[in-house]
């Protein structure tokens, strides 16, 4: 990816909202960091993949991460079910799709056929033997779904995990709750209280100015895991919770025998996410909350989902943030170019600007 010199970027109309994940992800017309990555050729992205968007399937590891997030950041809104009979893997997703189809009035045969396709569960290859095996493993879960046992209760959404994933979730949550470096940031002050902005959604119109003076607006959104404003120390904490199946020692970049090895943090471009969120947060505090006297600190709270379930707080230095800003701006400019010239055309824009207003 070239370093572009002749475009300018400006963040306008900063807004914040407290909204559910369902409402946030349903918003149309906005791009996001995760969506921009689909345009990043360095990670296998392309204009075609950007237009296709995400292919939503069942991923137990992602669902586990969501559950850990909810219990650490917004436990008043979510609850982990104690039920241990949910099948692991795609069987549970298949059963959930059957349940949804039956609720919509579809007959059982059509419900099974459609669920098989939607869940990518032996699509076109379901045999009586597979169905019998699925029935044995999943009927109890289907029965609980039909009885409404997992519907929201007392204003809380219920998360249901397989026995193995439920054990992992509890281990991750306990690890984070016991971690002194993480809790030092999350726990309340004794005197002047901290302010928490957990799962806050921020929005901006990003104005991209092309070399010929043409301007184009890219609508951008981001949902920040944890923002903590400490008026005692005047530190504004931007925190992101990550679960990893890798050994925690390989989360950040590391040096071994004079060789630098890329960690999960760099491999997944988490620095770009933090950089974009930092810009949004600074604009929101300055322009909406009118708070300017602070030091901003970006952290990753990471926890292993296997092994010893270790957790740690990683403070992200400015060199990562600066690199993330450059990468973010380049992708925003590429997106603006395609939105004007078409996604079917090969990108021919000149090098795009590093100037940020």
Image: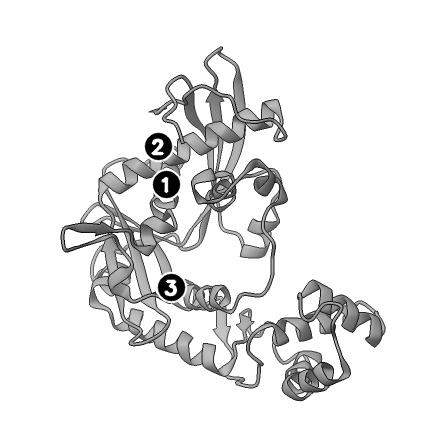
Please provide percent x and percent y for residue 219.
Answer: 53, 34
Q: Earlier in the sequence, mark 3 or mark 1?
A: 3
Q: Earlier in the sequence, mark 1 or mark 2?
A: 1
Residue topped by disc 3: 243
Give the answer, above or below, for where 135 lies relative to 260: below
The residue lying furthest to the top in this view is 212
From the image, state whether disc 3 or disc 1 is nearer to you.
3
Lateral position of residue 227 relative to residue 162, left or right: left
Q: On residue 292, which mark appears?
A: none
| Disc 3 secondary structure class | strand
Q: Callout 3 environment at 10 Å: few (<14), some (14 to 19), or many (20+)?
A: many
Quadrant in which the N terminus appears: top left
Q: Residue at x 52, y 79 (%)?
A: 162
Please provide percent x and percent y for residue 262.
Answer: 29, 51
Q: Are marks 2 and 3 in contact (CB under 8 Å)?
A: no
Quadrant in which the C terminus appears: top left
Q: Is residue 156 visible?
A: yes
Please provide percent x and percent y for residue 310.
Answer: 27, 71
Give the answer, above or below, for where 272 lies relative to 169: above
| Disc 1 secondary structure class | helix
Q: On residue 281, which mark appears?
A: 1
Q: Earlier in the sequence, mark 2 or mark 3?
A: 3
Q: Callout 2 environment at 10 Å: few (<14), some (14 to 19), or many (20+)?
A: many
Q: Residue at x 20, y 58 (%)?
A: 191
Q: CA distance from mark 2 to mark 3?
A: 26 Å
Q: On residue 326, which mark appears?
A: 2
Please provide percent x and percent y for residue 21.
Answer: 54, 56
């Amino acid at each position: 990816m070239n370093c572009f010199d002749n475009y300018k970027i400006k963040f306008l109309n900063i807004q914040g909202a407290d909204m559910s994940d369902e409402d946030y992800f349903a918003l149309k017309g906005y791009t996001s960091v995760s969506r921009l990555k689909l345009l990043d050729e360095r990670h296998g992205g392309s204009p075609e993949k950007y237009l296709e968007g995400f292919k939503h399937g069942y991923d137990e590891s992602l669902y586990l991460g969501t559950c850990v997030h909810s219990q650490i950041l917004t436990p008043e809104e979510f609850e982990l079910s104690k039920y241990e009979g949910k099948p692991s893997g795609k069987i549970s997703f298949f059963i959930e799709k059957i349940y949804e189809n039956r609720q919509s009035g579809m007959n059982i045969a059509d419900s099974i056929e459609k669920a098989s396709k939607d869940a990518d569960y032996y699509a076109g290859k379901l045999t009586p033997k597979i169905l019998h095996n699925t029935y044995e493993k999943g009927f109890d879960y289907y029965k609980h779904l039909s009885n409404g046992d997992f519907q929201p209760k007392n204003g809380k959404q219920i998360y249901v995990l397989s026995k193995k994933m439920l054990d992992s979730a509890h281990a991750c949550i306990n690890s984070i709750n016991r971690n002194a470096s993480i809790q030092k940031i999350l726990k309340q002050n004794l005197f002047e209280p901290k302010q928490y902005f957990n799962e806050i959604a921020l929005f901006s119109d990003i104005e991209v100015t092309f070399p010929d003076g043409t301007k184009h607006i890219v609508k951008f959104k981001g949902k920040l895991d944890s923002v903590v404003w400490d008026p005692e120390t005047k530190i504004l904490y931007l925190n992101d919770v990550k679960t990893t199946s890798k050994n925690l020692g390989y989360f950040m970049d590391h040096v071994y025998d004079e060789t630098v090895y890329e960690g999960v943090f760099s491999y997944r471009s988490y620095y770009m996410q933090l950089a974009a969120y930092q810009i949004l947060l600074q604009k929101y505090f300055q322009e909406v909350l009118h708070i300017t006297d602070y030091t901003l600190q970006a952290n990753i709270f990471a926890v292993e989902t296997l092994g010893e379930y270790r957790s740690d707080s990683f403070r992200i230095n400015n060199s990562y943030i600066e690199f993330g800003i450059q990468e973010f701006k380049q992708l925003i400019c590429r997106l603006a170019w395609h939105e004007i010239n078409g996604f079917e055309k090969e990108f021919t824009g000149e090098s795009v600007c590093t100037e940020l207003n």
